[in-house]
Amino acid sequence: MSDLLTVSGLEVDYRARGRTIPAVRGIDLEVAAGEVVAVVGESGSGKSTLAQAVIGLLPANGTVRAGRVELGGEDLTGLGERRLRGIRGARIGLVPQDPTVSLNPVQKVGPQVAEVLRTHQLADRRTAGIRAVELLERAGLPDPAVRAGQYPHELSGGMRQRALIAVAIAADPALLIADEPTSALDATVARQILDRLDALRAETGSALLLITHDLAVAADRADRIVVMSEGRIVEQGPTAAILADPQEPYTRRLLAAAPGLAVDAVAPPPAPDPSPTPVAEVRGLVKDFPLPRSGGSWRRGTLRAVDDVSFTVGRGETLALVGESGSGKSTTARLLLRLEQPTAGEVRLDGVDVTAVRGEEWRRLRRRAQLIYQNPYASLDPRFSVRDVITEPLRAFRVGSGVEQAARAAELVDRVALPGAVLERRPVELSGGQRQRVAIARALALSPDLVVCDEPVSALDVSVQAQVLELLRELQERDGLAYLFISHDLAVVRRVAHRVGVMQAGRLVELRPTADLFDDPRHEFTRTLLGAIAGRRRTVDEAAR
């Protein structure tokens, strides 16, 4: 196969606060026609900068300092913006990471796809709309004619990502760049998106440059893997060779941290001794949300988000709730913490029905259940120092003096394995993993019995994920904490959960010990979730051989 894309000696710098920051150093890379090459690495490794340099979309403070990017023998690095606009979309298509910010919120989806066709003079005003519907269908969007007339906010995350794929393939480009195209999606939707990209590549013969932090995704999809760290390529080669015999310690760490590649080899944690009184008990929980009136009717319908859900969480136990977006798992967690009021059912903490208590009794119980949010970037007040973040619950519940609160913050920072110097920093000065450790420290400030972890590692690199999961395990063993662990990633769940509950359309369709559920899933939806684990496709294929 001839090389479609050739990157030679690429170096990229950023200018920030009067300083030059090297982001990419001496990159040599080839992608052949029809080939899938995955570039993997942690946040800050330079993989997204590499993709932006290839397509000529570096931010204003980014500069290609040296090297060449050749597409079909033509050097793109010296081209002007007008010429690059003729190449983007026509010869190189981009599927960006976040469909929420990549689509125009005030323009319907169909015209956004049609715009590419008209920009590259592939359709006129009359035919562009028809072609846009056809492209949405090719991208796997259900009811494409209906979706073309909707705004992005009216589509699910997976639908929005398919719309971006339609934009990327509109001109049948020879090269597709997919920059973390599934990192914000459920496992089943992520698999559908990647399957669609595979099918389109096979149909058109295009090449795919896949940017990802997850080696399990690369293992499933790529012909070759390129591993980046600190702006350099540390290792590259055929996928089978990288997985079977990685040469670099960094690659070995990424492989060890990828949950999907070791999901069948990792045993779930041993079950704790059952507690006579569960820390938390949910009985017949129901939650209905009113729907907007439609069609001129005076009646309002309801959406049943949680439907007759019951479970217990014992001391020292981790119960995981898994399911797709909209399955009701996060709403169940909010009901347990009484951040939402249930339509029916009971929520008991240490035998007390929290849906019935008020005032001081509720405040006393509320201290015993705390929450770790999904996004460490958004859950910490950017104006606060880390000390203020951690002591905020103590101030809210008037626990201890100022000196005692500061000492408690120092103790908690040490328990989550952060240096004491972070107490004076603000969240923006910390990495994602450090921020999540601060969020854990804040949740532990009031010495709770139950911690609700709502997708606590889904926004983190796999190596940082592994560190945070290990921290949660150590804290549980030391303090007997009970966790309700909300996740869409069954590979992560196998590492931490004693029992797993599978939710679909608001109902708990299966609740069993972790090993039993993985070895012998009973419900069809559970089997679908297990089949969508990234990395399992290659594992199954190797077992078949």
Image (spheres, helix red, strand yellow):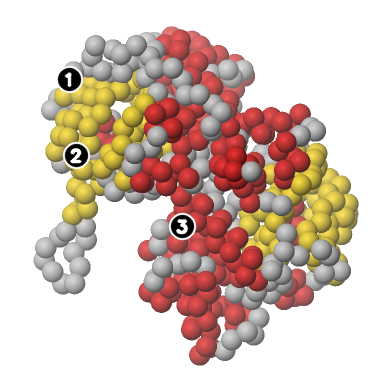
Left or right, 314 with respect to 234, comes to left
> Relative to 412, does residue 120 appear above or below in the rendering?
below
Cα separation, mark 1 vs mark 2, equals 19 Å
The dot on residue 352 is 1
Residue 169, image x, y percentages = 61, 70
Quarter of the image with the N terminus is bottom right
Asked if the residue at tag 3 contacts the one at tag 1, i.e. Cβ–Cβ closer than 8 Å, the answer is no
Q: What label sits on residue 460 in the rendered view? A: none
Mark 2 element type: strand
The image quadrant that residue 35 belongs to is: bottom right
Question: Which residue is found at the position 41% from the left and 58% from the top?
Answer: 156
Q: Looking at the picture, how far across and down is residue 200, in whole percent?
A: 60, 67
Label 2, residues with CA under 10 Å away: few <14, some 14-19, many ≥20: some
Residue that numbered label 3 is attached to: 158
Mark 3 secondary-structure assignment: helix
Q: Amino acid at mark 1?
A: Val
Q: Quadrant of residue 426?
A: top right
Residue type marked 2: Asp
Q: Residue at x 28, y 30 (%)?
A: 337
For the point 29% across and 48% down, the residue is 505
First reached walking from the N terminus: tag 3 or tag 2: 3
Q: Secondary structure at mark 1?
A: strand
Q: Quadrant of the C terminus?
A: top right
Nearest to the eye among marks 3 and 2: give it: 2
Mark 1 or mark 3, earlier in chain: 3
Camera-nearest residue between 339 and 16: 339
One can see residue 107 in this view: no
Q: Which residue is mark 2?
A: 308
- In the rendering, at what x and y percent does residue 415 appear? 52, 14
Crowdedness of circle 3 by 10 Å Cα count: few (<14), some, many (20+)?
many
Report the residue that reaches farthest toward the left: 298
Camera-nearest label, 1 or 3? 3
